[in-house]
Every structure is written in C-alpha cells, then in structure tokens.
Image (spheres, rainbow, N blue to C red):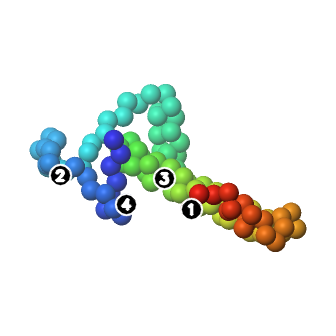
Amino acid sequence: MVYRDAESSSVPPSSAVVHFGVPTTRPRHQITETPAVARALNIAARRWPGEPRSKLLLRLLDAGSAVLEQERSQEIRSRVEAIGASTGKYADAFSGGYLAELRQGWPE
C-alpha cells in the first residue's frame, strides 16, 4: 500500500499508533542493513559526514526522490520535444478529407 502526504492529495492512516512512547499517525518502516543498504549509507556518510545512519537514510530518500522527479521531468520534456519536432512533417501523407473518410466507418 502506498501512502502519500497532503501534497499528493492523500492522507496517512487515521488511527494513531504509539511507537516507543512517540504517538504518530504516520506509517513506520524498518530497513535491514543489507550490503546494498550499507554501501548506500557509506556513500551518504562521505557526503554528509557526522550524520547518524538514521538521518542518512532520510537524506538518501530525499536525494533519490529528487533524482527520480528530475528524470521524470526530463522524460516529459523529451516527449514534448519529439512531438513538436514531428508536428507538420507528415501533412502531405494524408489527403484533405482523410479524417472525414475515416470517421464515416465509425458508429455514431
């Protein structure tokens, strides 16, 4: 199940949960420090020295989500540019009445 914050127009679960005396309505996540997680944390520790590993996880999440958002924006820009580049290129490929003829076969 995916939970999104208020910015994503969704709300976290409504029932309050108490974890170690800290009330929260937000879901909590547990991460095992596998070799891949340890590698990522070690890289983050070089970038943000002196931070505890729990804080490094949050920084990695922020950095990773920012990269994913940038990649998505670039994908959209590339698609829009491709559409713009092809606009009008194939005008002579279809006759003037092509769409009208095509639509004649469609049910109303």
| Any part of residue 75 in sight | yes
- Residue at position x 16%, y 41% in the image: 19
Name the front one of labels 3 and 1: 1
- Mark earlier in primary sequence (3, 1): 3
The residues bearing labels 1 and 4 have C-alpha atoms spaced at a distance of 39 Å
Residue that carries the numbered disc 3 in the rendered image? 65
Numbered badge on residue 108: 1
Q: Is residue 84 left or right of residue 77?
A: right
Q: Disc 3 marks which amino acid? A: Ser
Q: Mark 4 sits on what residue? A: 8
* Residue 97 horizontal/vertical position (percent): 79, 70
Q: Residue at x 14, y 48 (%)?
A: 15
Camera sees residue 52: no
Within-10-Å neighbours for mark 3: few <14, some 14–19, many 20+: few
Could you tell me how far apart the alpha carbons at marks 2 and 1 are, in whole angstroms?
Answer: 47 Å
Relative image position of residue 21 (x, y in whole percent): 11, 44
The type of residue carrying mark 2 is: Ser
Mark linked to residue 78: none
| Displayed quadrant of residue 93 | bottom right
For label 4, the crowd category at 10 Å Cα-Cα, with few meaning under 14, some 14 to 19 and many 20 or more, is: few
Tag in front: 2 or 1: 1
Q: Does the CB distance between marks 4 and 3 fall below 8 Å?
A: no
Q: What whole-number distance in Å separates the C-alpha atoms at marks 2 and 4?
A: 16 Å
Indicate the secondary structure of the residue bearing disc 2. loop
Which is closer to the viewer, label 2 or label 3? 2
Disc 2/disc 3 C-alpha distance (Å)? 25 Å
Q: Which residue type does callout 1 highlight?
A: Glu
Q: Which residue is mark 2?
A: 14
Distance from disc 4 to disc 3, alpha carbons, whole Å, reads 14 Å
Residue at the outermost right position: 92
Discs 2, 1 touching: Cβ within 8 Å: no
